[in-house]
Image (cartoon, coloured by chain):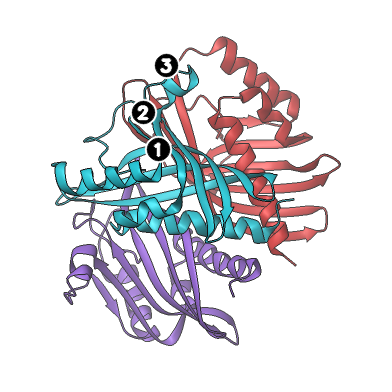
Chain colours: A cyan, B red, C purple
Amino acid sequence: MITSELRCEVETLYANYAAALDDNELERWPDFFTEDCLYKLVPRENWERNLPVALMLCESRAMLRDRVTAVRNTAVYAPRSLRHFITQFRIAEETPERLRVSANYMVLQTLVDDLTRIQNAGRYLDLIVRTESGLRFKEKVCVFDSVLVPNSLIYPV
Amino acid sequence: MITSELRCEVETLYANYAAALDDNELERWPDFFTEDCLYKLVPRENWERNLPVALMLCESRAMLRDRVTAVRNTAVYAPRSLRHFITQFRIAEETPERLRVSANYMVLQTLVDDLTRIQNAGRYLDLIVRTESGLRFKEKVCVFDSVLVPNSLIYPV
Amino acid sequence: MITSELRCEVETLYANYAAALDDNELERWPDFFTEDCLYKLVPRENWERNLPVALMLCESRAMLRDRVTAVRNTAVYAPRSLRHFITQFRIAEETPERLRVSANYMVLQTLVDDLTRIQNAGRYLDLIVRTESGLRFKEKVCVFDSVLVPNSLIYPV
C-alpha cells in the first residue's frame, strides 16, 4: 500500500539525488546507490528494441566512483550548471524492502554566457531498496528521448 | 479537507495519465475519463476572452475514442516522443465525490534526430469525479500559453 | 519531523505562489511574504562567490509593493505569459514555526506569436514562517543558473 508517507520519503530521495548533481557535488552521487547496483543511461530507441548499447553503464558502486573520477580528472569540457526536474512519480511496492519507481526527468543545462537549455529528458525506471541508511538505488535506468544531446553527456543524469 | 492521502491519489492519477501518453499507449487515454465528459484544448487568449474556438474539443468518451482512431489511422506526421511534466497541483474539494484540480503542464517533444524541445505548456483546469473504478476526469480543459506550436498538435495533451 | 501533511502544506504554498504569478495577479505577490522580509534574485555565479549584486532586491513587503507598481506603471515591455515549474522540494524544520525549503524552479515565457521558451531556471532557497494567516516567506532567494535571460527579467520569479 503506497501511503503518502512513503511517497514523501521517495520524493525526498529524488530531491536529494537531484541536489547532489545540481550542486555539483558529484562525489556524493555513488552514495545514493547500493554497493551492488546497476546504473544505465540508454536512448529510448535502444531500450524499446532491447538493444544493449548504453551511453553509460555502471554495474557496481565502485564503477560509479570510477565514473566520478573520470569526470573530475580526465574529461575535458566547458563548465556548466545542471538543473533536474523530476515529476510524475509512480511507485509500486514489490515487498516492504523493494520499490519499483518510475518518473519523468528533464535536465536543464546552462553553459557560461549561454541561455538555459534542455540537455536531456526521459524517464527513470528504478529499483529502490530499503537499507540501514535509508532508501538506495539498486537499479537506475535512465531512458532518454533524444539520440541527440546538446554537447556531450558528461555528467550522470 | 485536502489531506496528503488525497493529494497522493490525485498526483498518482496524473502520473498514470502522463505515462499513458508518454508511453504512446493512446488507446488507454479515453479510460481516464467518464463516459459523459469534456476535453478541451484551447489557447490562453481565447480562454481569457471567452472565445469558443478550441484546437481539440471532445464531448464524450466516444469522441475521445474517435480522436484516437484519427491519430492512429488518418493523420500523417513524423514519429515523436512526448514527455509530460505536471506540477503545482491545486486541489479543491467541491463534494466528497468531486474535485476541482488545476496544475501547470509542459509537454516536451522529441522528433527523430532532433533535440528535445518544448512543444506545449499551459495549465490544466480539471473536474475529477470519484467513480467505482477510481478517479476519472469529467472535464479536462487544457489552456495553453502559445498560439504557435512546433509542428502541429497531433496528440492530446 | 517532516510529515507528508507538512510537505503537502508547503507544496500548496508554492502552487498558490506560482498561480499568482502565472495568472498575472502580481498584486497578490507581496501577500505571500511577511511584512519584514527579504526577496533576492541573484545569478548563481555571484551567489557562489558571495558577491552582493542582485538583479532584484527587496527588503520589506513595502518594497515588494513598490516593485509591483514599477512593473505595472513604469516598465515598458511586450506582453507575455509566464508558467512556473517548481519541483524537488527539500524541507528542513528549524523550529515548529520556521522551515528552510529549497526547490528547483523553471519559468517558461511565451511572447505573443512566439514559441514557449525557458526564461529562467535555478533554485529557491527560502525561509518560511508560520503566521496567523498561514505559511509566509520570510526570505526568498532565487539563485538562477544563467547570466543571460531572453528579454529582461521584468516579473519576479
Q: Secondary structure at mark 2?
A: loop
Spot occupied by residue B124 in the image (x, y as percentages of width and height): 58, 47
How far apart marks 3 and 2 lie (CA) works out to: 14 Å
Quarter of image, res C100: bottom left
Q: Secondary structure at mark 3?
A: loop
Mark 1 is surrounded, within 10 Å at the Cα level, by few (under 14), some (14 to 19) or many (20 or more) other residues, namely many
Q: Is disc 3 on the same chain as disc 1? A: no
Q: With respect to residue B93, does B129 lie above or below?
A: above
Q: Chain of mark 2?
A: A
Residue at 65%, 36% in the rendered image: B39
Residue hosting label 1: A121
Spot occupied by residue C96 in the image (x, y as percentages of width and height): 57, 85
How far apart marks 1 and 3 lie (CA) works out to: 19 Å
For the question of whether residue B28 can be seen, the reply is yes
Near-viewer residue (C61 or A62): A62
Q: Secondary structure at mark 1?
A: strand
Q: Is disc 2 on the same chain as disc 3? A: no
Between discs 1 and 2, the one toward the N terminus: 1
Residue hosting label 3: B78
Residue hosting label 2: A146
How far apart marks 1 and 2 lie (CA) works out to: 8 Å
Mark 3 is surrounded, within 10 Å at the Cα level, by few (under 14), some (14 to 19) or many (20 or more) other residues, namely few
Q: Amino acid at mark 1?
A: Ala
Q: Are marks 1 and 2 in contact (CB under 8 Å)?
A: yes
Q: Chain of mark 3?
A: B
Quarter of image, res C115: top left
